[in-house]
Image: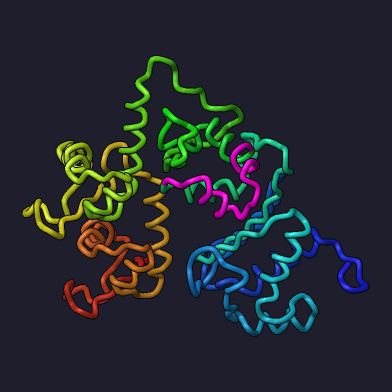
Amino acid sequence: MEGSRRISIRDTIIREIASNILIHREYMNAFPAKIIIEKTRIYAENSNKPHGTGLINPDKFTPYPKNPVIARFFKEIGLADELGSGVRNLVKFVKIYSQSKPQLIEEDIFKISIPVLPQRGDAVSPMIIQQDERMRMLLEYCRKARTRDEIQSFLKLKNRDYVRNFIIKPLLENNLLHLTNPENPNDPRQQYFSLSDTPPVTGGAIPPVTEGVNKSKIRSDYTVKLLMEFCRVPRSREEIQSFLQLKDKKYVLDRYIRPLIEKNALFYTLPQTPNAPGQMYYSKPGTPEVVNKEELLERTQKILLFCSSSRSAEEIMGHINLTHKEYFRSQVLNPLVRDGFLKLTIPDKPNHPGQKYIAARK
């Protein structure tokens, strides 16, 4: 009931999603709008002109009128209230419908995910792990090693045993999460991480590691792979040492950084002066067993969509959250220009201070 009126919560949620798609769509973008209803979630995607990026916090977000004429029309016919009411209504009704919160992600493609969560006491099955958007977001969050308390806080859950037994444990059993200290699972400092190439669950658990395999080697391989992911953006020795949670500077250099450089898996940002105080280290796209093709494709699409209008190098770098200019130009911007994906607005003067880049029309 809402006031004295009986309403269908499910119908109201779908109405809010559909209204959001029509009112807030970026109509210059040909991306097709989608509403997908699955067993464990309702999921929607829509082209968008973002005024921020990332997960929307319903308590702090500031609504922005993207298509005010359409918004006024919907208000006149009673399918919309005031600006920002759609987000508030989704939060209100999803909490009743599935005892959870909707995930609203502001990017070039606006995404809405409304999970139907497993009930307390039900183990998370492989199929649910595969389908549940909340689990996918958790695995993304755990690209950096996280404690159980951090995971519990991220999921906004209060019951420690529930998080441990019905979320973390099934993900570990299905090789979607890994222990930073596999030899001592109950270590008070234990953390959990996921890998970018973690395979999806396809109906059965991934076979456990066979006996006789050196566990310390497994742990080392996972650590190196995680470090390579971390160094997609140039990192200092101090940042790498902090990431690995190691105290010995010499050990970090001798055990990790130098061997990886010798194998051409890590590279210097200042190759002519290896011992320079500002030296940083990075892994290149294309480095064997490090590159994630889907991630690179997604980044390229994000840049090209952003560059549908001309953008400066600084704007592009900020849009994809990179901070190292030399790395950005040599590994991201220049290859896109060389391969014809981006064009210069001042082609006769490549180094002009006012130079901008625009996506090539193909």
Q: Residue furthest front?
A: 188
Q: Residue furthest right?
A: 4
Judged left or right of residue 119, residue 300 is left
* Magenta range: 145-165
Q: Is residue 314 magenta?
A: no
Nearer to me, 200 or 205: 205
Q: Quadrant of residue 327?
A: bottom left
- The residue at 29%/55% (across/down) is 233
Give residue 48's position: percent from left, percent from top: 54, 69
Quadrant holding the C terminus? bottom left
- The residue at 6%/53% (across/down) is 272
- Above or below residue 4? Residue 302 is above
Judged left or right of residue 149, residue 225 is left
Nearer to me, 168 or 343: 168
Q: Is residue 164 magenta?
A: yes
Q: Quadrant of residue 80?
A: bottom right
Quadrant holding the N terminus? bottom right
Is the magenta region chiefly helix, strand or loop? helix
Give residue 352's position: percent from left, percent from top: 18, 77
Give residue 166's position: percent from left, percent from top: 64, 38
**Numbered disc total:** 0
- Above or below residue 140? Residue 18 is below
Judged left or right of residue 20, residue 326 is left
